[in-house]
Structures are given as structure tokens and as C-alpha cells.
Amino acid sequence: MFSIISLLVTALFLLLSAAFVRSEMRAFVFALLGVLTSLALSTDFESRLILVSATVILFLSREFLSRYREVHEEFYASLVISVAGALTMIGSQDFITFFVGLELMTVPLYGMIAYFGVRERSLEAAVKYLVLAGISVAFLLFGIALLYAQLHSLRFDMMVQEVGNAGPLLLMGFAFIVVGIGFKLSLAPFHFWTPDVYQGAPLPVTAYLTTVSKAAVAIFFLRFLTLFEGELISGWYSVLSLMAIVSMLIGNCLALTQKDVSRFLAYSSIAHMGYIVVAFLCSGTLRTDAVLFYLLAYASSSLLAFSSIQADRKIPLVLALMSLMGLPLTAGFMAKFHILSAAFENEQWNLIAALIMSSCLGVYAYLHMALTTMQAPAQKNSARDPWALVWVLALATIALGVCPLAV
Amino acid sequence: MMLFALIILPLVGAVLAWLFESAIPKSAKWISVVTSLLGVLLAGTLWKNSEEWRAPWFPQWGIEWYFALDGLSFVLLLLVFVMTILASFSVDRFELKQPGLFHALLLSTSSGVIGVLLSMDLFVFFVFWELMLVPVYVMCFAWGGKNKNFATIQFFIMTQVSGLFLLASILLWVFVYHTQTGVYTFDYWQLLENPLDSTWGYWVLFGFLVAFLVKLPAFPFHVWLPPLLAEAPVAPLLIAVMVKTGAYGLLRFVCPLLEMGFVAFTPYLIVLGVIGIVYGAVLAFAQTDSRKVLAYSTLSHMGFILLGILSQEEFAFSGVVVLLVTQALSTGALLMLFSHIEAQTHELDMKKIGGLFKVLPSLTVFSLILIMASIGLPGLGNFIGEWLVLLGIIHGSNVVAICAATSLVLSAIYSLWLVQRLFFGPLQGVSSLIDLSKSQIVIFTSVIVLLVSIGLYPAPLLDIVASSWQSEGVE
């Protein structure tokens, strides 16, 4: 709660100070201080995960934006507000707060994706994201409304009590909510925005979309599922598992032919979200551990990937790709291991088979991309590369693989 | 602790080799050799104490660093070190760029293989199984020959995919154990205590089989081997250091499962073994590139080894291990000799070069002796192995033994054909070549001495190996 407030206060300060004197460094320092204060004030693992990812992305943005001559306070302010929205969303106890958080997270993203507009051809990506996000949010709202009609409350705890005597519209409401969430998580068949937006958006924004945006929605969904355990799950279990299977297979299949790294990472993220849904579909304590650790490992590997793309370093990028593929002794392997364990525990044989098949496909896809990276000619990079960041993330990826902390 | 040190030792050597090469040229090779010799000594002393070592890793899953040394692991361990030494010497003639990194990766591979041979915790086994290949991939990509992308990618995909099946099998076994006893453990001996019921057992066996058959290699999963062996100068290392892990996996993990009674697959595997023998031999006969002849001859011998493993007889197991050792020595040394030729002629195609006896007399002599070894000439180690395997197979089935014995005949055919085309006959394609240097003669002589000593006095080796069957309680 206080973390959110501190973030919003920071954003306010940033914007107000921009009215007086414009300075990139001051904007960055304010944003960094705000995020770090918020990190200090945060109390649970999920908020910390999001805030640490946000810090990394802040550093990435700083380096990225330094290549352009104007001052970019709005970017930092948008980032901070968006993170505040993410924290609101994961901490929400009723649908109104959730919705406010979701919008607070998404709307600045429209601006951030479109930030360089025509110059970097981001406009197309931004418009796609805007339109599709708008439609999915409309579905989400309608689903919430249907749930309200059935359960007579918007607060989660009261909704759970009413579930027993709800009518058939409950399932439909849930389906609409799944549509909205599926869009944000880029699950098939709601994944079509992902490659274009990932390619068109500025690199730090893509990193933000991959880590914070998806993590926040996934964490919310996890909390939601844990609350509504049992009653709703049986109804749409098959739909979710179908979505998971299709995501996993489509993500890795389509990744096979990509040449651009950002698009490749977009397709790989579709597959990874499929893996997370496999974890969602398990029950019990293993689920929370698996999902949270997966998000942590996925965040660390993705951030490593994006920062090494930005710093134009090949070896960390190959390490990140191998981690995403699931090579042992990397974070990605431990994450897959957790999910496989949870799935075995719950005897989800179809999901396990699909996971293995898609990992097999992924092996070739990631290897191909790693080879393309290693054999691409080196480019001159003029800006100061965040190499320290890259190596820290690389170490984190390996460390998580060797000795993951009990989540 | 010392067992873990055995794994870390080559890694330390790797780092040293990489660092020192820039300071002192040619030092990397000697560092690698010294490290391997130290490893042999360390392994020898550890064997006297017959150790195991445990350290916790993920207690909530029951995963721990659990290493143990028994006869089977010890023999293969020594083999790994010896082959690393041989491999370090084999790349002398090539103008390697960054030899320090090359030897570092070579030592890392041997470290990974040692990890595979020592680990008794299934999770640690899987980690090392995947990791031992990473330096191999890097080596193939960096120093491979003309076809390296295709060969390495194919190898990578096949081993990774089979690794995924292995992971699924391991997890399945662990979770079945958990449902039956409520305990999470990846400790192999503990898992064995609990008999698996039939459906689960077959799935577990399936996963293990896929992984190990790809590595063995067995027909039809052998397709990665011939292209990869053509990639000099990495070729001798692969067959020598790493390929034996497939057979090790079968002996260690699949045999107890087969003993539990999951024998429905065995007839099909026997068929695969026999096909491997014949197919490998026929294709070996048809090759023009000498290294591919050796690749298919490996396939043929591995078919034979597969039949030995399936016979579930103690004699056959000892024979299999002897065959692994001697075949690694003989084929590995042959590949190194061929690399020596290729380093100078850039060509091993027998249509283009031939009659090398006239220009490379000592190399030809060594090749001839090693070829005789791989055919199974009595007096050299391979014969002991083949004889023991056949002894074991005959206990089970005469028909299979007859099919297996054809391997002896067929291997003679293609090996002598290879020797005839490459070394004897009219000189073509080359003018004058540098023969083996003194140090290389010493090394190959020592290989042959090893083979002869195993051939004439195999008792120590057989005793060491047999001790592991007795402790496992194989009948």
C-alpha cells in the first residue's frame, strides 16, 4: 500500500518538476529513488519481484533514452505510474481495485510504446496494442459485470461465499474474464498482438511488457485462482488447458522461422505463458511455488536477453536463450523443473506431454536463434552499454539455476 | 568430498589451461595431460577407499549431491582420463586457433562425463548429462569442419530431445515413489527399493531407453554420429570421451529396471541391436570417407554391445565393459591417426588418397594393429570383450548369439577393406607426408600396450568390473 503511494508521489514530483526545469538526470534519479523507496516499503515477494524488474528496466531505459537528444521525463513518469498500477492490481481484494490497477498499468503503456512514434515505427505497434487492449478490457469489464450479477458483490471474499448458489451466467462471466486476462498474458488465441508490439516498441518497453506487465497479471490470476479454488476451476479447466497446450505449441512453432530477436522473444513468451498456465492448472501449494519461481526465472532470463540485445553482447544473449530453453544449471531449467514436478504431482498427463513436445520444438528454435546471434557480424555500438547490468543478470540467472531460494 | 574433487579437478585444469595458454604457448596441452594424470592418481586412491559422498542441494525435493564410485564407474572414469590425454595430443598437427580454449573445453567435457559416471542422484545425473554436452557443442561450432552447422545442430537436437524424455522419466519415477511412500527422493538406490507397478514402469523405462539409445548410438537413433565424426579435429574426443555414457546409462539404470520385470521391450531391442550390427557393417563397407567407416563400425559394435546388455548375464556385462574400454581405445586411436593424415592432406576420402603405406609406414603399422584390435583378434583386448559377451548371449538364446557373432565376421570385412584401400594399393593423391613424431609413437605404443595387456591378462580389469555386479546383486 505504501509502496504504491510512494510511487505515485514520485510520479507527481517528476511531472511537477518537469514544469520548472527539464533534466533527464533528475527525472531518472527521482524515478529510481521512488522505485527503491517503494521496494523498501514493500512487504511481499510478488511486489518485490515487480519492483526489482522495474528497477532493471529503469536502468535499461536510461541507457536507451540517452541515445536521443530530448529530455524524457514523461517516459519515466509513465513507467512509474504503470508500476504503481501493477502493484495495485496484484494487491487488490476486489474487482474495482483490480480494474483501476489494470488500467493504471496499461494506459501509460500506450504512451510508452508510442513514445518514439513515427521515428522508430512504433506507431503501428502502439495502435495495435491500444485497440486490442481496449477490446480485451471491454470483455473483462463485461465479465466482471456478469460475475457481479451472479455473486452480488465485487469483493473477492464475499464473492467466494456466494459461488455455491450462482447461476449459469457465472461460467460465462468467467469466460469473458479469461479472454481479458488471456490477452494480457498473450495466451493463444489472444496472442496476435505480441510479435508486432514487441518488435515495434522501444526495447525497454518491450522488456517491461514481458516482465512486469505479464507478471502482474499472472500474479493476480494466481491469487484469484487460489481464492476460487474448486468451484470455478472444474468448469473451465479444459478450456484453460487447451489454451495452454495451443500456446506452448504455437509459440515454439512460430519461433522457428524468426530472424529478428524481438519477434523471437515475443513468440517464446507466448510459449512460456503456456507453461505458466500449466502451473495454474495444478492444485495445492506446489502451484504457488511453481508460478512464482517461474515468473522470477522468466523475468531474470528475459531481462538478461533484453539488456544484452541493447548492449549488443552476444554471449549473455546466448546464455539468456539457453536459460529460456531450459538448459540445466540455469534459472529457466529450475523453473521448468518446478512446473513439471507440479504437473506430475497432479497427474496432468496431457499437459506434461504438450510441455515436453513444445520444449523439444523449442530446443531447435532457441538453438537456431543462438547460432544466428553468434554468427551475426558485430555492430558498432556508440552508447555506453550497461555491461555491468548484463553480467549481474547473467549471474542471477545462473545462481537461480544452482541454488534457488525457497520462494 | 574427494569424489566431488574428482569432478572439479578437470574444471580447474580447464581454467588453468585457458589462462596459461596466452602466457606460455603450448602449455595448454601439457596442463590438460597433467590434470588427467592427476585425475587417474586421485581416482586410484579413491578406489581403495570405495567412497560415496553426499551433500544437500534441494532438501524439499530430496535432491542431494550424491556421488559414488564402484567398479563400473571407476573403469570408465580411468578411460575418460586416458582418452582426454590422447585427445590432447591428437590436435597437435592442426593449427588450432585459441588452443587454450580448446583444451579448456576438452577438460570441461571430461569433467561433465565424470559427473555423469559418479552421480547416483537422478537429478544430479540429469544435470551432468545435459551439461557434459555443452562444451562439445561449443567445440563443434567453433572448430568444426565443413559441415559443422548441420552436424552439430542435429546432434544438439537429438540429445536435448532425448534428454527431455529422460527428465520426464525421472520425474515420473520420483512421483510414483512419492505417491507410494510419501517421500520425495531422487536417490537412485532408494528409488530402486520400491517396485514399480507395470504401467508406470514401462513409461519410466521408455524415457530412459530413448535417452540412452540415442547416446549409444543404436539404430535408428544413430544418425547424428557419422556427420559429427567427420568434423575434425573434434572427432576423436566425441567417440572417446563422451559416447560411452550411453552404454553406462543402460548398464546402470536400465538393467535394474529390466530385472524388475519390464521385459516386454526386450525382443524389439534385440532386433534393433541386430539391425544395428548388420546395418552398421554394410554401411561401413560402403563408405569412402575413412572416418565415416569408423562411425558406422562404432554403430555396428554398439549393436553388439546392446545385445550384450540385454542378455542380463554377468559375463556379458563384464564383456560389455571390456569392449567399451578397448573399443574406445582402438577406435579413438584410429581416429587420431586419421586426423594426423587429414591435418596434412585435408582429405580422407579413399577415392582420392590411397596407398599411404609408402609414405606413412609407422602410421600404417599402428593402424593395422588397431584395426586388428577392433576386429577382435585374440591377444588384444577387444577379443576378450567379444568372447565374454557372446558367452553371456548364448546363455539366453542361440539365435541371438549367432546373429551377434556375425558382427565378428562383418567387422573383419569392412575393416580390412578400409585398410586395403587407404594404406595398401597404389599410391595416389599424396606425395610426401610427415610421419608420426616420436611423442606420437610413444603414445600410440602405450595404447597398444594397454590393449595387449587387457588381451593377455584381463583379470584385474574383470575383477574390478565384476565387483560392481556383485554389489548390485545382479544374478
Image (cartoon, helix red, strand yellow):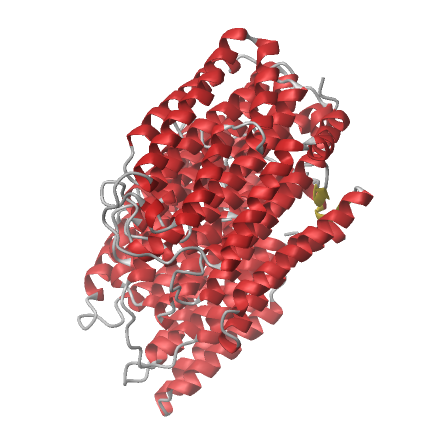
Is residue A1 placed above or below B177 in the rendered structure? Answer: below
Count the marks: how many? 0
Q: Please identify the quadrant where the N terminus of chain A is shown.
A: bottom right
Is residue B310 placed above or below A201 in the rendered structure? Answer: above
Q: As drawn, is B458 to the left or to the right of B100? A: right
Q: Residue B286 location, x and y as percent?
A: 28, 30
Q: Residue A407 location, x and y as percent?
A: 63, 52
Q: In the image as oriented, which residue stretches furthest toward the left?
A: A118
At 32% across and 40% down in the image, what residue appears? B422
Is residue A304 placed above or below A354 in the rendered structure? Answer: below
Q: In the image as oriented, which residue stretches furthest toward the top?
A: B398
**A76 or A91, nearer to the observer:** A76
Residue B55 visible, this orientation: no
**B237 or B155, nearer to the observer:** B237
Residue B47 visible, this orientation: yes
Q: As drawn, is B103 to the left or to the right of B145? A: right
At 58% across and 37% down in the image, what residue appears? B325
Q: In the image as oriented, which residue stretches furthest toward the right?
A: B49
Q: Residue A378 location, x and y as percent?
A: 29, 70
**A298 or A383, nearer to the observer:** A383
**A361 or A273, nearer to the observer:** A361
Q: Residue A235 location, x and y as percent?
A: 45, 27
Asked where in the image residue B189 lies, by quadrant, the reply is top right
Asked where in the image residue B94 lies, by quadrant, the reply is bottom left
Is residue B348 placed above or below A35 in the rendered structure? Answer: above
At 61% across and 50% down in the image, what residue appears? B81
